Image (cartoon, coloured by chain):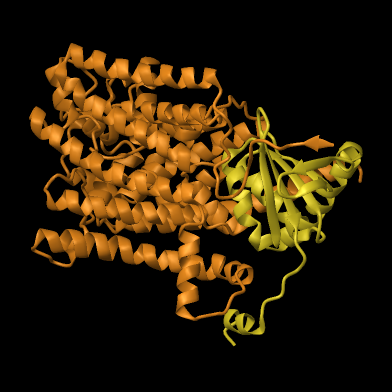
Chain colours: A orange, B yellow
Amino acid sequence: MTSLPCNTVNVDTPPIAVTEPRNVISAFVILGFFALVSLGSFTVDHRFIYYSAYLWFGFIYGMTLQYGRFCMASAIRDLFAVGVPRMAVGIMIAVILFSLVSAFVTVAGKSTFHPSPIGLYSVIGGLIFGIGMVYTGGCASGSLYKTGEGSIAALLVVLSLAFSQVFVVDAGGWFNHLVPTAWTQATVAQNLPGVITPTNGWYDQFLAGYVWNLTAYTVGELLGFTNAIYAAFIGNFLINSVIPAALILTAIYMHWYRKAYLRDNQTEYMGFRTELAGFWSMVTASKRTAIAGLVLGIAAGLHMWVMDGLQHRLGITNAGDLLKGMGFSGLSIQDTVFDPGYFYITTQEAQGAAWVVQKLGINVTDNIFFGLDNGVPNPLLNPVLWMSISLVGGSAVMALLNNEFKFKMPTLEIATWAIFGGILMGIGARVGLGCNIGSFFAPVTNGDPSGWLFGLGMTVGGLIGVKFFNWWIGRKMAKEMAAFDL
Amino acid sequence: MLLSRIFRPIGLAWVGMRHRLFQSDMLRLKQVDLPGHGTLQVDESLNFVGDNCLRTNLLTKLLLDKAVAGTVFEISSDNLSAVETIPFMLPNCNCEHLATIHEPTYLKIYVRKRKTQTLPTELKSRLHGQ
């Protein structure tokens, strides 16, 4: 008989064992490394504090995402595949809180957010991204934090996501036939610099010939609020975030939670009071996810405030000003680099991949994405990449402290899914102008309705991915059974 | 949908048979002492160590849905996301979570299939909008 008296947990208690001393040491080594980078770079040039701000917010994101297992792939997949709403609920909590903090930041005039154009591309991009993330088992942020837990499969996702974006934005030749003539004509009319060869590259024509002609607005602007407080709190916060999030939570409760709740709590049914108790029970079912949603929402809002404050303090509008001032290269032809000023993933990874491709002798700056807008700086000097790297580090620290860090080599099958899904995520991210963070989480919390369009596509894509995976597992089992001649 | 209807039962049958064929001698005799539950015999042991979360969750749900009341499962996984999701899927599978145990490199979740619970008539009518 096996006796298992210790380390036993239940649903409400996180399964944390006693932290091993070597894990604590490793966690402090990682923390010390980032502290050293932060202090060392500041000593070299005080303007690197802008980089450190990205770094430490990335670190907080990493710790939070790992603590709450925060993953949008998990949210959609668990809901449709096994009927568990825990993660979807956590994400809606984060949406509401990030939106509230964003409203304060916007009213204070410290927001760094710019809305994306409204168009069908968001739905299509989200759809491709959603299918891909179910195959990989993690969204863009989820794959980063899982890399910090030691998952090599997640690292493969990040790498394939990064390199596939480089291919997407630089593909010309045959791919030019994919775009309508109207887009090509509209691109020519933009009179873009010849060095980026805008009519040779489907993505250039997609951006200059289609996306740039769409209108971008927040709900506050759309409703015509002239008062900044009304625009931020009624338009952006209440109408674009709280009401849709509350409707989604209600739909989740009715469809996935209510039945089991009423069955397991067979007390006297008191109408709305019982329903409200059930709803609250769903929201608080996973304290871990709810707490992560709360911290993530507040941190993401504060991040914008801090970055805007630093931009004013340093007298810059873009990190490209810093790189130029310090004499570094890798800027776009507008002397800019990618610098959103808030939580963002995918573009900085694409820049890192582009830098590697450039080092192999292939020019990838003859396009709008890298050449005109984002640049291809050295990864060590890419401020937003500092955030991604520290996100992995923050996740590793949290995993180590909870004895959850483990190097996991994937099987060939899982590695194949990771690479294939990562490629789809890369394509989806570029078509949708971002990932689950940059095109969903940040927009919906800042009054930009395009985020919900991306979210819709991502949900439908996730559903398709789950259906396919269900079929795939059944097929594989049937094959295994046939091989054993059973 | 059609393919799913064809392959699901085949898949379930295979998982069940595979465990009986290759792991049953050791596992079927296994007993564990879980705090609050005393000594229990593990009827089915599912090993998902190394698997991704979707596969772990999907297969676990399929097996729990089809299990006979009283069956005790031991589910092994090193996927943290799956380990935390499984306890939340149990109410919908009419199962109860007994415990989650840390092993050095993975976790074990103990689950028991409950007897079918019937809803009071009032709740039934409300759920079905009658």
What is the quadrant of the N terminus of chain A in the image? top right
- Relative to the observer, which residue lies in front, A319 or A389? A389
List x then y, in percent, for residue A258: 55, 70
Q: Does residue A361 appear to the left or right of A313 in the view shown? A: right
Residue A335 in the image: above or below residue A106: above
Say how many tags the image has: 0
List x then y, in percent, for residue A165: 40, 35
Task: Judge whether residue A157 can be spotted in this image.
Answer: yes
Q: Residue at x 21, y 18 (%)?
A: A329
Residue A118: which quarter of the image? bottom left
List x then y, in percent, for residue A426: 43, 38
Residue that protrudes farthest toward the bottom in the picture: B130
Task: Judge whether residue A115 can be spotted in this image.
Answer: no
Q: Residue at x 50, y 68 (%)?
A: A278
- Relative to the observer, which residue lies in front, A219 or A233? A233
Q: Residue at x 80, y 35 (%)?
A: A2
- Relative to the observer, which residue lies in front, A48 or A59? A59
Q: Does residue A384 appear to the left or right of A427 in the view shown? A: left
Residue A92 in the image: above or below residue A159: below
Residue A169: which quarter of the image? top left
Residue A290 in the image: above or below residue A231: above
Q: Does residue A229 appear to the left or right of A160 in the view shown? A: left
Residue A79 in the image: above or below residue A243: above
